[in-house]
Image: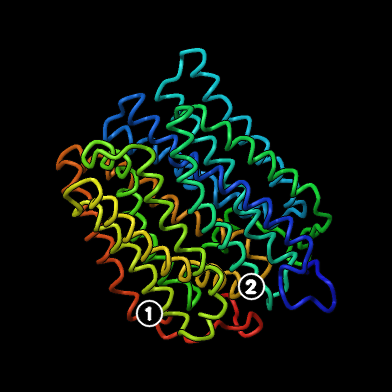
Amino acid sequence: MNVQESAPPQSAWANPNFRNVWSALSVSLIGSQITSLAVPLLAALTLNATPLQMGYLAAAERFPSLLFSLFTGVWVDRIGRKRLLMIWMDVLRAVLLLSVPLAAILGVLTLPQLYVVAFLLGTLTVFFEVAHYAYVPVILPDSQILDGNSKLQVSHSAASSAGPGLGGLIVQWLTAPFALIFDALTYLASAFFLLRIRAEAPPLRNFPPQGVVKDVREGLSALLRQRLLGAWAMCGTAIVFFTGAFEAQYILYATRELNLNAGWIGLIAAAGGVAALPAAFLTTRVAQWLPVGPTIILGTLVWVLSLLVVPLASGPLGVVVGVLALARVVSGLTFTVANVQQWSLRQIVTPEHLRGRVSASNRFLIDGAQALGAVFGGVLATGLGLRRSLILLCIGGLLCFLPLFFAPIWKLRKMPESSTVTAP
């Protein structure tokens, strides 16, 4: 049962518990954006990583989803203290990140340490995000979930706009290892905001635990066999296999082929974040104006198309930066709306007792595909070169959209009510 007032406010923002969840997420996201730029730059520029090593590094962060996410979902659905779990994950991630600048000071920082840090950080993030996904519907009624997710997406967009630019400046100023100190501090701030929340849901005792394997299978089935979610989950997994391979090589291509420094890379990423801000604010209205299914599919399609601009960009530095920034702006506007819609759709159509497992199943597929794709991208770039491999990866991602135009989600016009949807 949701922890909420009998007459909930019309806006999620009026809920003090939600405001603390939003604050915790917002502050940690900015730090995470800095880390997402600092770690690959550290590997590429300081430790002279090869394309295959860059693939290993990207895979190390995603690989925990393959190992732990399904069982994490079962556990999260069985426990009540999801907020306490998120607090501990924040504290442990802060401690873990501080080990990198410490190793740099001692002169013992190596790529294997980065692999270990990325793997452990990914493991802690799996626990945090599965709990977070299941916890938001605890403090918000169904009628406020889209509004709440829109506000959370504003945080993602604001972090995407401020984080990379700030990260680029910090990396230029302090070097990549010491930029991670800022992310560690943001995780501690996130834990502080979560400590202020008093709402906590009890375990769902009316759904007694079965065997772990049976619980895992039930979560996967609820995602893959659900009429609106199944095709999107399977095609989305294939799409992120190719985009994960692309993103694992992006920093290496930008620094070695396009000769961009940390500041320019951060500025380009920030352009997309700035464009995503108004899109996040307008998501609720867009859901009323445009059909939900086509918005999700076409908005994501534009994002993949924007990646193709990267290996095709050429010319003077100003032209390259301008073209890449423009592509980020367009994808930021469309993908933000699409992401909030699919995120909200999955929460609404999933029964409460399955939300943790469905979220974990989604992470298992998406992050697992990204991990395998990252290694594949490293192998492909080693054999074909960075530019040709990036072009082929974009084409592969685009082909994965074809089945979606014949799936039930393409015909979805309005967001369904949770009471009208049943799990398989």
Q: Position of residue 223 (x, y in %)?
A: 51, 67
As shown in the figure, which amino acid type bears the numbered disc 1? Ala
Asked if marks 2 and 1 touch (Cβ < 8 Å), the reply is no
Which residue is denoted by mark 2 in the rendering? 147
Q: Is residue 292 left or right of residue 92?
A: left
Question: Of circles 2 and 1, which is in front?
Answer: 2
Task: In this rendered view, identify the residue nearer to me: 90 or 214.
Answer: 90
Residue 376 location, quadrant = top left
Q: Is residue 311 left or right of residue 96?
A: left
Residue 199 location, quadrant = bottom right
Q: Quadrant of the N terminus?
A: bottom right
Residue 407 image label: 1
Q: Quadrant of the C terminus?
A: bottom right
Q: Is residue 391 left or right of residue 365?
A: left
- Image position of 41 with respect to 72: above or below: above
Q: Position of residue 40 (x, y in %)?
A: 39, 36
- Residue at (33, 39) in percent of width and height: 55
Q: Quick one: label 2, few (<14), some, or many (20+) residues within 10 Å?
A: many
Residue 207 image label: none
- Residue at (59, 59) in percent of width and height: 357
Q: Is residue 388 left or right of residue 132?
A: left
Q: Quick one: label 1, few (<14), some, or many (20+) residues within 10 Å?
A: some
For label 2, the SS is helix
Say how many tags the image has. 2
- Residue at (39, 60) in percent of width and height: 237
